[in-house]
Image: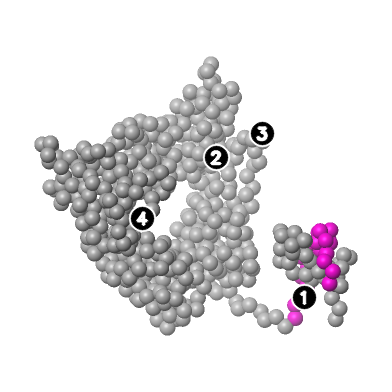
Amino acid sequence: MSTTVTTTGVPADAPWEELVASALLGTDRRPLRSEGGAAAGPTALLDAAAVHTLRRRAALRPATGTALPEPAPADPRPPLPAAARRRLAQLLAGRSAPSSGGRRGTAPDLTELIPQWLASAGAHGYRAPAELLPALLDAARARTDLRPHVLAFAGPRGLWLAGLNPEWRFALRTTSRGAQRPDTADPVAVRRLWDEGLFAERVALLEAVRERDPGAARSLLAATWPTERAEDRLMFLDSLRSGLSGADEAFLEEALTDRSRNVRSVAAGLLSALPDSALARRMAARATSCVNPDRTGGAVSVAVEAPHECDAAMQRDGVVPVPPSGRGERSWWLGQLVEATPLGVWRESFGGRTAQELVTLPVADGWAAELHAAWCRAAVRQQDPDWARALLGTPSTPLANGPGTVSLAERSKLLATLPSSERALWVAGFIAAHGLSEAFQLLGACSVPWDGPLGRSVVDALDIARDAGSYPWSFSGVMGLAERCLDPAEADRLAVLTTTPDEPEDASPGAGGYWSEAFQRLVSTLRLRAAMEAELAQPCTG
């Protein structure tokens, strides 16, 4: 049977991957071969690509002797209510009104609401409509931030479908917490999946076993640990954060000698989160030899003598010897020692003083910023809310005069250790004292929807900026967060801000119209979010 060729002599059934490779590398470096064996030039490549594209769009060539795929697995979760199903189709289509003249307009941005809709649908326990699985997988392929929610919502049928299309293979390499977990009741099936499963399946299995029996998960991992790839060992080791306990110490101590530096670093971080571990005691001994109470002046202060070397034992315990550019070696080593030391050690070392009292002690020789920043990282690593409160200080304190770090990124991590209501109150106070320009990262640490005091502080700050005639795009990031995070019940109260204000004489030209559009979009988005929640709460009729 002769091979069909194009008018340029290139075989019509030349694989698409070969055409793409030749186009990317150039026909000189990766030539296509015509039917007679001669190299085809750029024109022939383009003609062959056009023919191939037309054939792909027109129809599929009938296959013979191909086995049908196994049926899709069952998904016992209830189906979506009809209104919610229509809403999902609308969100995936992204049918928001187009903006004009570079302005975002007043219509909600539907694509930005997809993560929230998926999270809410997952919380209700619905399964994805079969007809929308391709669109969901396409959306997750284009946006990595959607993948955890999409895979959880798509469930076993989504994974089955992803296995039939190479463009969706990412789903087979990705794990998502909250996705359909494997059955861990059958130890034989668990071991077979662990030995033969895809990486994503193995990670999901390890998480599921860890949730049920931490020791069994650790044994499962230890059985194949020496033969795993370094990047896989890193992901598997990270799963031990859930249910971490002293029983994991021996395994983690072994991981301190791993050939991968990243694996050693993660193992050291996990061990330092166990205050009674041998590593934590070793780090505490090193840190307390560097940081001590100084009573020579009468009042107690903090004396600091940073390490003079980073020996092999320190490096084995996770201390990275080479500092980043711009950091001194001794301060770099000191920070790592203090970060890995259990915070309770400092209370004992300084005569029972509380965290609040410790962070207010004077620190000798200009080491305060380094010491406090290391305490901040330790509080985050050990999830200690008392130390987080002490290091955050009061929200009204000027940024440069706070007891902890001036870094907003580190402050947001400290906030994450506090209860959500306390977190929201602190950020609300920060906005009242410092405004919105410094608060964007802190808002990202707050639970959604924002508590009433936080929501009101954001809206009040936006209203002040609006009355001042500032350009609204200076606050576009905060406005976007407000659209996703404000309580939808605030929509009616905000409607008064949708009118175009009178512009002050020194206002930016046209700012009032932009603010009106921005608040109209905010109100419209909040009302749409309320409608979405109502649709998901409707009783399902089939």
Disc 4 to disc 2: CB gap under 8 Å: no
Q: Earlier in the sequence, mark 3 or mark 2?
A: 3
Disc 1 to disc 4: CB gap under 8 Å: no
Q: How many marks?
A: 4
Q: Which residues are magenta?
A: 37-64
Task: Provide the residue designation for mark 1.
Answer: 62
Q: CA distance from mark 1 to mark 3?
A: 49 Å
Mark 3 vs mark 2: in front: 3
Task: Provide the residue designation for mark 3.
Answer: 101
Q: CA distance from mark 4 to mark 3?
A: 53 Å
Q: Residues within 10 Å of mark 3 (few under 14, many from 20)?
A: few
Amino acid type of the residue tagged 4 in the rendering: Pro
Please, is residue 145 above or below residue 473 in the view? below
Residue 524 has which mark?
A: 2
Q: Residues within 10 Å of mark 1 (few under 14, many from 20)?
A: few
Amino acid type of the residue tagged 1 in the rendering: Pro
Q: Residue at x 36, y 55 (%)?
A: 321
Q: Secondary structure at mark 1?
A: loop
Provide residue 532's location: percent of width, then percent of height.
52, 50
In this view of the protein, can residue 270 be seen by the observer? no
Q: Quadrant of the C terminus?
A: bottom right
Please, is residue 277 above or below residue 536 in the view? below
Provide residue 420's location: percent of width, then percent of height.
34, 47
**Where on the picture, by quarter, is residue 213?**
bottom left
Residue 321 has which mark?
A: 4
Mark 1 vs mark 4: in front: 4
Q: Quadrant of the N terminus?
A: bottom right
Disc 1 to disc 2: CB gap under 8 Å: no
**Where on the picture, by quarter, is residue 450?**
top left
